[in-house]
Image: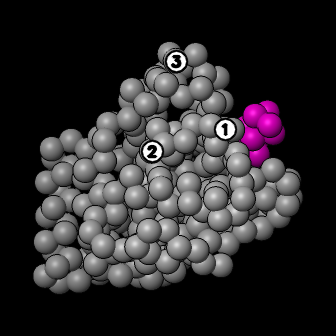
Amino acid sequence: MHYRSDDAQLFYTEQGAGAPLVLLHPTPLHHGFWLPMVSMLAARYRVVMPDLRGHGQSEAGDGPVTMEKLGADVERLLDELRIERAMFAGCSVGGYTLYELWRRCPQRVQALAFCSSKPQADTEQNRATRQANIEKIRQRGSSDFIEAMLASLIGPSTRSRLPQKTAEAREMMQAMRPEAIIAVQQGLASRPDSVETAKRIKAPCCVVAAGEDGGSTPADMRLLADAIRSGGAKVEYHEVPDAGHYAPWEQPETVGRMLRQFFESAR
């Protein structure tokens, strides 16, 4: 299904029935990231899985894909589906989008699950790395970038134990156009620090860290959990030891059980 948000036509799919649950994937993948666990959740919930702006079957629109645009897109999707209030899970950029969604419309948030979504903004070094990647993509296309992402975002345990996962992720990444990858990298580099936002969250939260994640480390995710807790919200923290940045996709049964139990408790 498609819907319009500002300057882009965006895609979403849904499964199941019940209380609405929106799942936001990481970059540079698409909604297929959630499919290995969706049956666990769709048995109890109406699971909505959009392709974020620039990913999968969704257009990027003009200019950088900022967190503000992504948050507005999700709010527009709720309007399109006539969902007043929902539960949400996001991984990486999907989680960064949830910070923005809380800033925009906290009244529409029933519960939040953050997977590998550190609250801090990019460091200067990270911004420089993103800019270097953008220049390489402009000069040589996205193939080298994709291979680097596969090596850094999928945990070594998964790459060793389940080598087919790398091939599956590569196929999803190759669906993203180079210009869209650039637009998302620009948006990630400019994303705001969300530590103070985390302290203002009042909805129940689940924080999932991965032991082999070098991007949003367990220390980063504990910082997030502590920030949420300091504001008085209920938060639970989990750590998946043998997984990387894509933990929900690398270990869908383990993380799926965590999320299902959390959302049951948050209803």
Where does the image place residue 157, in percent across and percent down from the top left?
50, 56
Visible residue check, residue 169: no
Residue under numbered circle 1? 111
* Relative depth, front residue between 259 and 15: 15
- Amino acid bearing label 3: Gly
Between tags 1 and 2, which lies in front? Answer: 2
Name the N-terminal-most of marks 1 and 2: 2
Q: Main secondary structure of the magenta part?
A: helix
* Left or right position of 131 against 122: left
What whole-number distance in Å separates the C-alpha atoms at marks 1 and 3? Answer: 15 Å
Q: Residue at x 71, y 49 (%)?
A: 84
What whole-number distance in Å separates the C-alpha atoms at marks 1 and 2? Answer: 14 Å
In magenta, the rendered stretch is 258-267
**Contact, CB < 8 Å: mark 1 with mark 2?**
no
Quarter assignment of residue 121: top left
Where does the image place residue 14, in percent across and percent down from the top left?
72, 68
Residue under numbered circle 2? 100
Q: Residue at x 65, y 78 (%)?
A: 1
Where does the image place residue 25, in percent across and percent down from the top left?
53, 60
Disc sitting over residue 231 in the figure: 3
**Contact, CB < 8 Å: mark 1 with mark 3?**
no
Residue 9, above or below 162: below
